[in-house]
């Protein structure tokens, strides 16, 4: 009998050597192997009589084998056999496979799966397997006469061996307190996923697993919340009764009502010794940074450090600038790269940086850690915040809206603040889907617009270099676009200066470009989606997106949010070679809608959750079976969770990277 926790070396059929191989790839227990579900299935269930063999389709025959032969053709070892059923016979052929012959017992019945080649009147390289009756007895065909699972090559087992081992496991697997949910127990769902009766059964079984995955997530969310509430180790701060008193005069604008409310909620948490674990959601450009800055500034005034972690260096640099402008009295320090312990300044400081900040958290010992646009962060990075003898307050900022039902279940451990209005005076960015024939005229329009308003433009291409893949042949690359545009502008509008920025450039080169950009020495920046988050160029009014169909709505919206940030009219030009109706419709819909939440909903409808919720967003590793967009199943999970017996244990635990600590939110 096996349990999910049984070590794989205790499984019949797994020797010491293959156990070591498996372990190396992260497969240690039975659970690891049963959760490594097939990539796909091959339908070998289609059995025919030999007289009815159709060429070039995958078929299975049931036949008696005779005349097995092992011979050489030149230097090549070859094998053959004759397969006979009541309707006729056919030749089977293999190359370099003497084992297959030595295992055949002549005169016995076999299933033979392969494709018939009419030219040679033979089946070449078929899979053969002794035929068993489908009578529920222990012996069962695994490789033929059924839907056959095909597994990822990253699992260090031969396909056939893996099937045999999984069958051995599944035949003897016990899951204590296995619940019948969606009319299926977990054990059954594993059976159906690895050795499905029908394709429909696979779908049901995956849904059952998805439900279990959601239950595990809900469980984890509640655990985190519980542990969090028990903690009283965070530094607390004195908070003025009126938020306005926390605002330095150096902030040149009035907060919106939503910003004010969020600030109040955030500061309220900082007054407690229970560590904050809050999510601040606000559409692109809604002004999350200043809210974060107010908290950091207040903390600095009361003698503690804080840290803001940004997903890119561009964004970190920009936060540094913004904070210096908005809070001139606070000490701000940029950290990029390096792992050495930091000479932490005595003066309370706001540290800003990329993940490099996380390596320094122990020496910084911040009272507050802020993750900006956190969907770029993995769980592993996040949990680093924990090697401290107290718990810092945590604020996560995101532009991705989260449906209410998710918030109530899977993210129930997070407090939520929402900035649901834009600063006054913002004009919606005008978005156009431009046909390729208007490319030159739109370049001309762009040049004139830039010159007339001393504005800047950003041109985004999906790739750095032209691709050698045929499929991507026509997809604009940054280097190509840069050359073409430089040539065009030189000829027609020589006053305009272009810059190129992408991830393969040297860091120093990138920095020079970014500095030139902020200094206004570049009018047109050609780049890759690396600018998706954060770039805050006050004079940027035009964004051109090449191969726009390649981006999700959320990304497009982020990109569009880069322009018109200082109340000037912004323009977003979408180029697309995609001919499919759905791509066009999606881009048309995008050009008509400016509300990030509505776009997210559209995206959910059209593409499933896609990359809307990102992979490691919110600290949970990627969902393997469930889909964030399946709100119905999430609703079911919520209900089932309430009814779980006390003995229930989550099947999907936090990923090993996340550590044992409750921080990873
Ligand atoms: P996001 O929420 O996308 O991170 P930012 O914090 O970068 O947005 O803010 C976008 C721009 O709006 C910044 O230039 C910021 O200074 C400005 N801003 C923020 N709040 C206000 C406000 N209440 N009134 C006017 N401008 C604001
Ligand atoms: Mg931001």
Image (cartoon, helix red, strand yellow):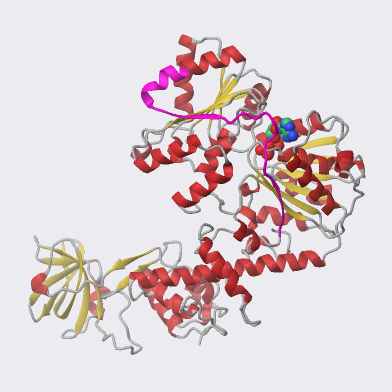
Asked if residue 419 is positioned above or below residue 34 in the image, the reply reads above
Quadrant housing residue 635:
bottom right
Please tell me in which quarter of the rendered image ligand 1 is found: top right
* Residue 503 visible in image: no
Residue at 75% of width from left, 40% of height from top? 257
In the foreground, 389 or 13: 389
Asked if residue 327 is positioned above or below residue 292 in the image, the reply reads above
Residue 426 counted in the magenta span: yes
Q: Position of residue 428 (x, y in %)?
A: 58, 31
Quadrant housing residue 576:
top left
Asked if residue 573 is positioned above or below residue 40 in the image, the reply reads above
Q: Give the left or right position of residue 327, taking residue 21 as reference.
A: right
In the foreground, 16 or 200: 200
Q: Position of residue 72 (x, y in %)?
A: 17, 66
Image quarter (top left, top right, bottom left or bottom right) of the C terminus: bottom right
Q: Give the left or right position of residue 382, taking residue 138 as reference.
A: right
The mark total stands at: 0
Residue 430 counted in the magenta span: yes
In the foreground, 93 or 437: 437
Quadrant housing residue 249:
top right
Residue at 42% of width from left, 17% of height from top? 441
Q: Give the left or right position of residue 399, taking residue 112 as reference.
A: right
Q: Which residues are magenta?
A: 414-443
Residue at 87% of width from left, 57% of height from top? 272
In the foreground, 6 or 178: 178
* Residue 539 visible in image: yes
Q: Position of residue 122 (x, y in %)?
A: 12, 67
Q: Position of residue 133 (x, y in %)?
A: 26, 86
Q: Give the left or right position of residue 525, taking residue 230 as reference.
A: left
């Amino acid at each position: 009998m096996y349990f999910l926790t049984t070590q794989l070396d205790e499984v019949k059929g797994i020797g010491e050597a293959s156990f070591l191989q498996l372990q190396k790839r992260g497969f240690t227990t039975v659970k690891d192997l049963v959760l490594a579900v097939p990539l796909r299935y091959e339908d070998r269930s289609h059995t025919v009589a030999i007289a009815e063999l159709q060429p070039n389709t995958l078929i299975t025959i049931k036949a008696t084998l005779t005349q097995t032969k092992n011979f050489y053709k030149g230097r090549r070892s070859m094998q053959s056999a004759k397969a006979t059923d009541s309707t006729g016979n056919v030749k089977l052929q293999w190359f370099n496979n003497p084992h297959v012959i030595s295992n055949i017992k002549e005169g016995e019945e076999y299933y033979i799966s392969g494709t018939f080649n009419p030219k040679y009147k033979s089946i070449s390289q078929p899979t053969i397997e002794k035929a068993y009756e489908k009578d529920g007895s222990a012996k069962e065909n695994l490789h033929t006469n059924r839907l056959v699972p095909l597994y990822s090559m990253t699992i260090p087992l031969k396909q056939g061996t893996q099937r045999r081992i999984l069958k051995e496991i599944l035949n003897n697997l016990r899951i204590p307190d296995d619940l019948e949910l969606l009319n299926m127990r977990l054990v059954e769902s594993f059976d159906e996923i690895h050795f499905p009766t029908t394709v429909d059964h696979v779908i049901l079984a995956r849904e059952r697993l998805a439900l279990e995955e959601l239950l595990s997530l809900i469980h984890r969310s509640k655990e985190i919340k519980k542990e969090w509430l028990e903690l009283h180790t965070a530094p607390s701060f004195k908070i003025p009764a009126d938020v306005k008193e926390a605002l330095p005069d150096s902030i040149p604008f009035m907060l919106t009502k939503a910003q004010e409310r969020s600030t109040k909620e955030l500061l309220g948490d900082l007054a407690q010794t229970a560590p904050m674990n809050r999510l601040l959601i606000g559409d692109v450009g809604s002004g999350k940074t200043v809210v974060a800055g107010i908290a950091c500034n207040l903390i600095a005034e009361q003698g503690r450090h804080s840290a803001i972690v940004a997903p890119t260096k561009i964004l970190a640099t920009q936060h540094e600038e913004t904070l210096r402008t908005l809070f001139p009295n606070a000490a701000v320090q940029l950290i990029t790269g390096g792992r050495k312990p930091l000479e932490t300044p005595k003066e309370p400081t706001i540290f800003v940086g990329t993940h490099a900040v996380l390596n320094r958290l122990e020496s910084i010992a911040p009272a507050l850690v802020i993750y900006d646009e956190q969907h770029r962060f993995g769980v592993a990075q996040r949990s680093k915040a924990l090697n401290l003898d107290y718990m810092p307050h945590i604020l996560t900022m995101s532009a991705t809206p989260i449906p209410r039902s998710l918030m109530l279940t899977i993210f129930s451990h997070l407090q939520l603040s929402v900035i649901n209005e834009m600063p006054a005076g913002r004009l919606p960015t005008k978005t156009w889907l431009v046909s390729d024939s208007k490319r030159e005229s739109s370049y001309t329009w762009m040049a004139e617009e830039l010159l007339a308003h001393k504005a800047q433009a950003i041109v985004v291409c999906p790739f750095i270099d032209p691709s050698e893949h045929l499929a991507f042949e026509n997809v604009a690359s940054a280097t190509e676009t840069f050359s073409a545009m430089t040539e065009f502008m030189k000829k027609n509008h020589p006053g305009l200066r272009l810059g190129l920025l992408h991830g393969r450039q040297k860091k120093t080169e990138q920095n020079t470009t970014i500095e030139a950009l902020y200094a206004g020495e570049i009018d047109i920046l050609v780049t890759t989606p690396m600018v998706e988050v954060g770039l805050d160029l006050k004079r940027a009014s035009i964004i051109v997106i090449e191969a726009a169909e390649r981006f999700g709505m959320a990304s497009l919206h982020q990109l569009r949010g880069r322009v018109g940030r200082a109340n000037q009219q912004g323009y977003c030009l979408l180029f697309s070679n995609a001919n499919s109706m759905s791509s066009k419709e999606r881009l048309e819909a995008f050009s008509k809608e400016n509300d990030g939440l509505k776009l997210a909903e559209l995206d959910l409808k059209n593409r499933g959750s896609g990359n809307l919720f990102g992979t490691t967003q919110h600290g949970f590793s990627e969902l393997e079976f469930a889909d964030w967009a399946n709100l119905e199943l999430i609703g079911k999970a919520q209900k089932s969770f309430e009814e779980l017996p006390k003995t229930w244990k989550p099947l999907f635990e936090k990923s090993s990277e996340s550590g044992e600590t409750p921080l990873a939110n």
